[in-house]
Amino acid sequence: STRQETIDSAPSGQRHSTPSTAATQSLQLLLRDDYLLTQHELHITKNSQEAAFGYAAALLQQDTMVHFGEQHKIQQKATDALQEVERKLALVQSLAERVSRTSPEAVAGPLLRLHGYGISEEDEEIFEGDLSDGNNDNFDGSTFMNTSLRSTKSGGPTTTLVATRDRCHRLQRQSQVLESVAKRVETSLQRGLTKMEAATLKLSRVLALSSTLKMVLRLQFEANKLQNYELDDLRDLTHAAASVAIVEGLLKKIPRPEPHVVALMRPAVEETARKVRTAATLLLEKHQSGTGVVQLGATLQVYYHLGELPQAAWSAVEFGLTTAMNCSMTFWSSSAISALVDESMAQAKSASKSESALQRNLLKSLREHRRDASTQWASGLAQAALQVWNLHRVLCRKSDPVTRQVFSTVVAQAKIPAHLALNELTISKDFSVFAIFWGKLCNNLGKILKELLKIDKLTGDVAALYPAVRSAVLGMLGRLYDTMQSGSSSALNLSLEDTGSSSNGLLGGSNALDNALWASLSAKDYVSRSTTGVSESSVLSVSGTDTWTRADIENEDLNERVFLSTTSGTTTSLSAIFSLSEWKSMQSIGLQALQNAFLKSCRKRLCTPVEFMFPEGLSVDENGVAIQVLPSLPSRYDLQKLDHSIRSELSLADPREGGGDLSMTTMIAEAVVDMVELFCSRAKTALTEVGEDGFLTSDGNPSESLLHDLKVANVMSTLAIALKTAPENSFVVPYRPAISVQHEEAANLCHQALVPAMIKIEKMVKLLILNPLCHALNRRVASAIAKMHHGTYLESSVASGGMDSGRASFVQKHLVGLYEDIAEQHLSKLPSDYAVIVASTVASFSIHTFVSNASLIRPLGENARLHITQDLAEFELALEQLVLKGGTSISLNQVELGKPYAELRAVRQMFYWTGLHNPSLSASSLTKSMLREVWVKDVRPSTVFHFLFSFAPTLLSSPHHSKRIRPEDYVNILVNLDGSIDDGEASAWMTTMACCDSYQQRESVDKDSGNGDRRVAAILMMLGPELLRRRRH
């Protein structure tokens, strides 16, 4: 703003001057506003019309117009101005040093302004006057110190430095007074605190003595109560346990040395506590041994009062685990297994009179002994598991009546014993003593089986136990699952009806658990009900188990009952057992080693005979030189033996025949699939591998190599038939005329599991035998059909022969005998399943080849059309006979979904299409007319293209003529030897377009196209894309 005022106040002549003049005025204004420069007259120059700093003016005047000769003067002026500025800067620096040394107040003023204070206007004028008069030497600092300072921010009253100093002195004196007062107050408080501590100490002694007296009185009261309890009564035992817990807590809290009265009561109290613990231990042992009815909830309540509930629970789990492991060690021992085999052998010898009978009786005896031993072992596991399960249920539903704390929470909060700890993956996320027990049981069982299977001489006998063991375990888990499902509903309702009380009993809601339900579900009763002829109706009336999933069965064998428990019900019940975490743990951890050994032995029994099949054939000539001959093939007896081996292995899953469980069906079927893969690999080595060129002789008869490969195909077909019939022969046929849903379902599962094996056999036979045979036969058929281009359907030949001349037609002369030879020499030597494949492939290839060759005939007159139509009828009859001689009931119209047969019938209508007889119709109209024909959808596009060529002018060459190959070779491009035709259609369309392009070029040169319809080329170009589009969609 100051600069603008200066510019406005300048003369009008200078206001509109050059930029250098404006810059000079701005610099002069800045120099005048500087206090120190103005004071020392540093802004005054010799010439007021020039800038104080000449070099700046020189720089600013460079953009102005200068005359020649003046530029040197300006640069000289700038140099002089620069030297003058340097001199003035030195002068300013010396002045600044002098001011800071002689007049520090001049430096303090800017500092006060910087911190928000300013010098009053009067003092500032005095200060400036003194400086302007040059009286810097007489400048008194007190003058500046006595100037008033004021805040530039708050704008409040002015305060002098002297007043501020006096105020600080007053504050210092006041602080000294306050410090003396604080010392006197602290002394008074310290004296009061000392007196208070002494009084508090006396009071604490009184309170401690009072607390001790109260505990002694409570101790006497509880000790008197303990003398009145009868520990034989469970209710008194529970109260006594609560009192013992209180007394023991009081004895721990009484300080030492303890009073004389406490010392007198201590022996009696400790004796009573010992008796309470002994009684609780006896009750728990009684429950574990199953010798009587025990109220488990009340027993655990006693241990809860004693503070030993986790220890009691884990001891019960450990006892159950020890019981189960003792049973497992007894069963899974080398001596027990050897004794089982010896006893079975002795029993079989005593009941047999011949060697064959000995084998049958030995298998039966082994099956029975293995079943009984497995059932006894499963019963031991069931006893221990039910005890631990009952403990788990009581812990989950029982709670303390005072604290309302669930017992399972108390046990979960305690540390799990080291010998029972498991990996987190082996138990469920929710805490469960039963899950820990079952996981530890499975781990220990897995270790026992692994050690036992290391004994080589017992591996086979141990692995043979798996079917019976699996069935017994499933039966045990089925019973246990029913107990789990029924204990929470029927048992609770029964206890309410019997006791007439509410669900919350006297001891905190455990009344429903303190009854005879858990004892009635013990494993000993489970075994006794299974082995004796006692009806389950009485038990079911108490516990409510099995009433929903099982029927009442009396006087039946235990194994059958176990089998019925898992399979006689619905599939849902069996799937429920398989979904149990207990079964998954037992299968993946406990029985995994045994299952692997069993499957290994199954594969060994199945694959051992296969390894000796298909041996290399060697012969020796008269000179003793080895001659390579065809490999030997398995005999019919070998295949029957292999079929019997497959059915024997599958029957292990039958409870009656093999003692196993039907759920093993898929498992054993997988071993059979492995055997089939080995059989196929061995069969490949027995093939001659001569290929399609070596299958037929020069006269079309089967070669020796083909006959050998056909025998291999018969062997593979026999094995495939054995696999198809094995499920039904193993599970359904032995029980007829009875019908069992479970066995039929097992047969279906087995059939589905064996499908990969049958597919493997079919792929192997088709790839190595049938496909080469079909190629060889189709190549022979193609050569015979191609003879129709040797003038068979020329007008002259047809006219000389006539329709009723009695001469043999083309089909009768060249094809009927060929198809009869194929049926007699090839199809008759193949199994029906494989003969159908060969017959279908040959029939499909023959139809496509015959139609393609017939459509290439050119020219095609009326007599030729009639002759071809007659041959098509005879051709259809010959193919129908060929398919029927293949040994199947399918007809020609069922081959490849009837597509080849539909084209064969549609071609007859195509040959009598008369659309080109009307010369007035355009090419587009004819194309639309042809697309509306009924036969178009069943005929291949290439057939339609070739048929239209018969109406074309001579300039439009046929496709095979344009490619300069024989019709036979061109048809081989369209139709593959395996009967597929998709790749040939695109090739036919490309060839057709090339012919039409050549025709247009020829027509442009030679207008005379000869005989034929000139619209054919245009029709082909419009018709081709539409036919190909329809075929793709």
Image: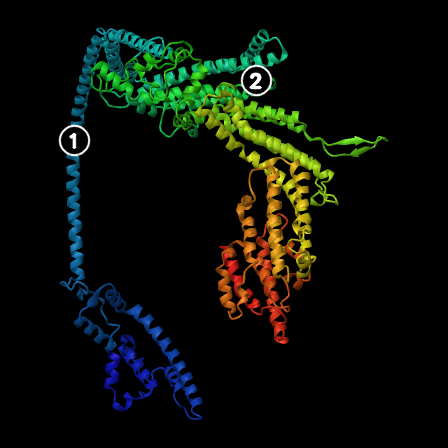
Q: Position of residue 74 (x, y in %)?
A: 41, 88
Q: Quadrant of residue 35?
A: bottom left
Of residues 739 and 363, the one drawn nearer to the viewer in this rendering: 739
Q: Position of residue 424 (x, y in %)?
A: 42, 29
Q: Amino acid at mark 2?
A: Asp
Q: As displayed, is residue 825 above or below residue 57?
A: above
Q: Quadrant of residue 52?
A: bottom left
Q: As displayed, is residue 585 above or below residue 964?
A: above
- Report how far apart the C-alphas of labels 1 and 2 lie in the structure: 95 Å
Considering every residue shown, the one lying at the far right of the view is 623
Q: Residue at x 57, y 51 (%)?
A: 904
Q: Tell which circle, 1 or 2, labels the residue nearer the N-terminal end.
A: 1
Does residue 457 appear left or right of residue 416 in this picture?
Answer: right
Considering every residue shown, the one lying at the far bottom of the view is 68
The local crowd at label 2, few if under 14, some if 14 to 19, many if 20 or more residues have their Cα within 10 Å, is some
Q: As displayed, is residue 304 above or below residue 39?
A: above
Q: Position of residue 924 (x, y in %)?
A: 50, 67
Q: Quadrant of the N terminus?
A: bottom left
Q: Amino acid at mark 1?
A: Arg
Q: Which residue is mark 1?
A: 191
Q: Which residue is mark 2?
A: 461
